[in-house]
């Protein structure tokens, strides 16, 4: 799993998790991604933190969310984005 910063200056990987994630088990999972005003981002899967990174290089306005699958068979039932301006 990776967090990428995509801006007018290009794309950069700013956080990664390289261990196995068992998400293809026919059970629902909650993926939570938070970012505070200081640029600290945390990704949790089922309440277990897997990535924490600080990124202050993003200065552009937030204008979207993208999720890409590089392999595997997943069903996404809901995406909720809160607190964006």
Image (cartoon, rainbow, N blue to C red):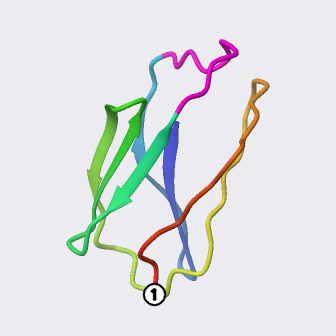
Q: Position of residue 33 (x, y in %)?
A: 42, 51
Q: Give residue 51's quadrant in the image.
A: top left
The residue drawn where x is 41% and y is 75% is: 83
Label 1: state its secondary structure. Answer: loop
The residue drawn where x is 46% and y is 25% is: 18
Q: Which residues are magenta?
A: 20-29
- Magenta stretch holds residue 46: no
Within 10 angstroms of label 1, few (less than 14), some, or many (20 or more) residues?
Answer: few
Q: Give residue 24's quadrant in the image.
A: top right
The residue drawn where x is 75% and y is 30% is: 74
Q: Main secondary structure of the magenta part?
A: loop
The quadrant in which the C terminus is found is: bottom left
Q: Foreground: 59 or 37? A: 37
| Total number of numbered discs in the rendering | 1
The residue beneath circle 1 is 85
In the rendered view, tell whether residue 18 sits above or below residue 15.
Answer: above
- Magenta stretch holds residue 27: yes
In the rendered view, tell whether residue 61 sits above or below residue 53.
Answer: below
The residue drawn where x is 49% and y is 87% is: 61
């Amino acid at each position: 799993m990776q967090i990428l910063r995509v801006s007018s200056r290009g794309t950069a990987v700013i956080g990664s998790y390289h261990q196995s994630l068992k998400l293809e088990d026919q059970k629902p999972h909650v993926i939570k991604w938070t970012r505070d005003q200081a640029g600290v981002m945390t990704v949790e899967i089922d309440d277990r933190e897997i990535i924490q990174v600080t990124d202050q290089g993003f200065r552009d306005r937030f204008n979207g969310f993208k999720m890409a699958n590089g392999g595997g068979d997943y069903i996404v039932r809901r995406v909720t984005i809160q607190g964006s301006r």
